[in-house]
Amino acid sequence: MRRVILNMKDRIFADAVATTLREDKQGEFYVLPTTTPEEALQYGTSCEPYALLLEVNGYPPYVLEERLKIRDAVKKVNPDCKIVLVVDENSEKKVAEEVRRAKKAGRIDQFIYGSISASYLVALMDTL
């Protein structure tokens, strides 16, 4: 089973994402939702997760710079951990562009727009 650490501000969306991953027919994902970035960092460095799924927006502590700090700390301990950022491309256009640049620069493994379908999310996480 692959562990996914989930840290998102929007709890309703986070619960929907967690449920979607848990209900994958392959039964591949064990989702650990976290309520703070510090908790995401703690789990990310201590339980050898398959992936960190982190929301990015324009407000601290969910800004890209802070998320990349978590990424750097986790990658030091677990270089194989996949870093996936979720951004709302409609309400956070500037942030979405910054996230795309981070992907192009190789800082993250993948990014997801908040408007994707549930089945696409599972498929994307499965192929990381």
Image (cartoon, helix red, strand yellow):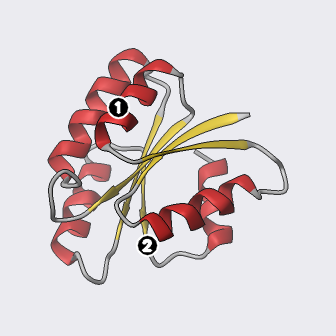
Q: According to the image, label 2 marks what residue? A: 114
Instruction: Say which label, 1 or 2, has the lower sequence index.
Output: 1
Looking at the image, which residue is at 71% across and 53% down? 22
Residue with the most extreme top position: 77
Asked whether residue 98 appears in the rendered view, the answer is yes
Q: Total marks drawn? A: 2
Q: Is residue 1 above or below residue 56?
A: above
Q: Residue at x 68, y 69 (%)?
A: 119
Q: Is residue 99 above or below residue 93?
A: above
Task: Pick whichever, 125 or 21, lies toward us.
Answer: 21
Camera-side residue of 57 and 111: 57
The C terminus sits in image quarter: top right
Q: Which mark is residue 41?
A: 1
Secondary structure, mark 2, is loop
What's the amino acid at mark 2? Gly
Residue at image position (35%, 31%) is 41
- The reply, left or right, for residue 47 in relation to residue 112 is right
* Picture coordinates of residue 18, whole percent (x, y): 60, 56
Circle 1 or circle 2, nearest the eye: 1
Residue 103, image x, y percentages: 32, 51
Residue 52 % position (x, y): 46, 41
Q: Residue at x 32, y 76 (%)?
A: 89
